[in-house]
Amino acid sequence: MVPELCRLTIAEASRLLSRKELGVVELTRAFLEHIQSKNSHIDSYIRVTEERALEDAARADTEIAAGNYRGPLHGIPIALKDLFETADIPTTAHSRVLLNNIPKQDATCVDRLNQAGAVLLGKLATHEFAFGGPSFDLPFPPARNPWNTNHFTGGSSTGSGAAVAAGLCMGALGTDGGGSIRIPAAYCGITGIKPTYGRVSRAGVYALAHSTDHAGPLTWTAEDSALILEVISGQDSRDPTSVNLPVPAFSKLLQEDLKGVRIGVIRHFYEEDERADDDVISAMNSAISVFRSLGASVEDVQLPPLQDFQACCMVILLTEAYALHKPWLQNQPENYGRVMREKLILGGVISATDYYDALRMRVELLNSVITLHNQYDVLLTASTFSSAPKLQETKGYVIFSRPLLMTPFNVTGTPAISICNGFTERNLPLGMQIAGRPFDEATVLSVAHAYERATPWRNFRPTLTV
Amino acid sequence: MPDSSASRLEELIELAKSVGLETDQAQLELLEEGVGYLEEYLKRLEAHRGLDADPAHISKLLNGNS
């Protein structure tokens, strides 16, 4: 069972902390004990920073007691996918290549969380460099799904998905180059948002593919994602792709009714282009009814086939990932896991012309999505074609065997959230995506929040059965 | 297997060897499967060739300046 304090959302805990009805050290100790008791079941943490967490917590208690409450993340226990650089704390990307890497500087996102007063519990498992996994030949084991530990968490933010779902942290940061925040969010029954490309700095975050990568939060609720996103967003001189736009107070813009909101359902992605499992389709139909009951208008819409987005995304991602890793891959191939090498080399046989063609196709695909947004505030589609598969079913090139429902929004760079929209008969979570206009995370989060408030799914936590 | 796929597979096998991957039957089958996926992707790109799209437009589209 998840202890009561570890079941609090960030929003609930921050209310208690700000009123001094809960201490940060008390809260942090509850999480550290829960990690000690349960992490070995799911291997979500590869490093617990207990001493640092207790120091952060004691400082936060002192500041809050003195009337210096910094805001909703002050005293909130969080954790980081081990791709985010942390000063004086090893950052390995779950790889032997970086096993002895101790950065001197925090990633910008991490620095912003520190400034907000968050408490760092530790570093979380990932696929090797966000791509090579799940794999058993790496220095750390792969994370397991807390709803059923024989099952995959989804990748690549594997530890982030597992830890948040199991109540081993209140929120986590992940990265998403082809679905890596949203897939674990869906398979682990939590909420994960990939913001617009440029909204959140990627400085100090190990890249998989520069032009499809995004950093963002994974949390229990959309409200909690809003609280983290408003802290980590904003232009950063260390990341030239970050955009100079005002950052809305996302958590203050959340609505609970959807009157006037226009939702376009990209049904052909999960019913025609590739057919999802019946329980996925049923959960999507139920969700559409909920959106209508909340006042939204909902219509089916048409985009190019999902396979076009997949082709475009994968050619770009594979090429950029291979180019990034080529020097290390040539000089120290033995330090990479087998899965990572098998996937990376595919990018080595794609020509420059093919890559350029993919970049041109990307403009066409983005145009098609932007055009739809003239009529629809958000687009809705499934997150995955099924619930989480068993870990042993994820071998080889299975990632390429079906298009990923996530890739359209890596191609477009537009914001997309995955939230839980039900469970299978075997108690595995299902997810759906809500995608918005560029830099309109506020509407995406608001629609997700309204749905979460109107449905019972946030009341269920995994019991960590094997 | 078309010539382009065969030469891509040959190139991939060389690359696999250079990064220390075994090239036993199971591995060769996996690499052949990988080339199959790549060819599918490239066929879709081919269908879009000829469109007058300039990749530089992406940031304008994303930032609402189209």
Image (cartoon, rainbow, N blue to C red):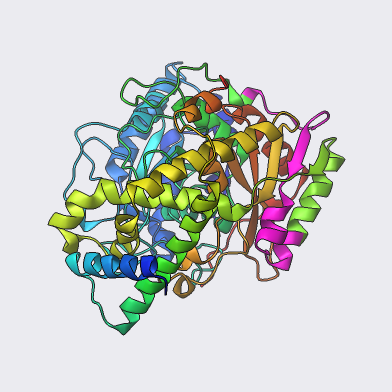
The structure residue drawn at horizontal position 45% and vertical position 52%, both measured from the top left corner, is: A314
Q: Is residue A353 left or right of residue A295?
A: left
Residue A65 on image: x %, y %: 44, 21
Question: Viewer-proximal residue, B39 or A40?
Answer: B39
Question: Viewer-proximal residue, A263 or A165?
Answer: A263
Q: Is residue A294 left or right of residue B17?
A: right
Residue A27 on image: x %, y %: 46, 40
Which image quarter: residue B65? top right
Q: In the image, is residue A265 part of the stretch drawn in magenta?
A: yes
Q: In the image, is residue A137 part of the stretch drawn in magenta?
A: no
The structure residue drawn at horizontal position 50% and vertical position 17%, both measured from the top left corner, is: A245
Residue A111 on image: x %, y %: 34, 28
Where A305 falls versus A377 (above or below)? below
Which image quarter: residue A257? top right
Where A348 falls versus A220 (above or below)? below
Q: Please indicate, yes or no, whether residue A258 appears anywhere in the rendered image.
A: yes
Q: Residue furthest bottom?
A: B25
Q: Which residues are magenta?
A: A252-281
Q: Report the number of numbered marks.
A: 0
Where A229 falls versus B47 (above or below)? above
Residue A165 on image: x %, y %: 54, 53
Q: Please indicate, yes or no, whether residue A98 appears anywhere in the rendered image.
A: no
The structure residue drawn at horizontal position 82% and vertical position 41%, both measured from the top left corner, is: A298
Which quarter of the rendered picture does the N terminus of chain A lie within? bottom right
